Image (spheres, rainbow, N blue to C red):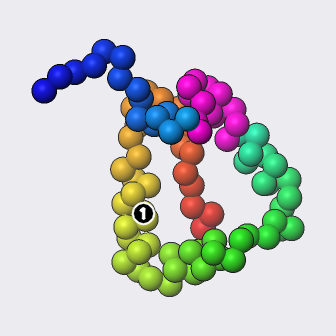
Amino acid sequence: MTTRSDAVDVRRQAGWLPDDQNDLESWLAGHRERVEARGEQAVLHPVLVEFEELIDTDPVVRMYIDQMIAQVPHAKGYSEAVVALGK
């Protein structure tokens, strides 16, 4: 087994997340503000409506979603909770 000192952070491996956590959190804050500004006018994509209904109506799915969110690491790199349920 070998270890690489130049290993890529797996959270950034695909290239669609910024290298800097502060840049990511800034983008998320801006996105959150844009969504909140739309208020009740925001229309969800139909697949998201179906997903919301699944979470709301299936207690097993809801339990696993709750566990998934509870297990988000509290380590350095997560200065804000980036996942929150709307309910």
In the picture of the structure, the residue carrying the numbered disc 1 is 66
In the displayed orientation, state which residue is furthest to the front: 2
Q: Quadrant of residue 84?
A: bottom right
Q: Residue at x 81, y 65 (%)?
A: 42
Dominant secondary structure of the residues highlighted in magenta in the image: helix
Q: Is residue 6 above or below residue 51?
A: above
Q: Residue at x 44, y 55 (%)?
A: 69
In-front residue for pair 15/74: 15
**Magenta stretch bounds:** 16-28
**Drawn side of residue 13 relative to residue 64, left or right:** right
Q: Is residue 41 above or below residue 15?
A: below
In-front residue for pair 54/59: 54
Task: Name the secondary structure under disc 1.
Answer: helix
Pinpoint residue 53: horizontal percent, then vertical percent. Answer: 58, 81
The N terminus - image quarter:
top left
Does the stretch in magenta take in 45?
A: no
Please indicate, yes or no, whether residue 78 appears anywhere in the rendered image.
Answer: no
The kind of residue tagged 1 is: Asp
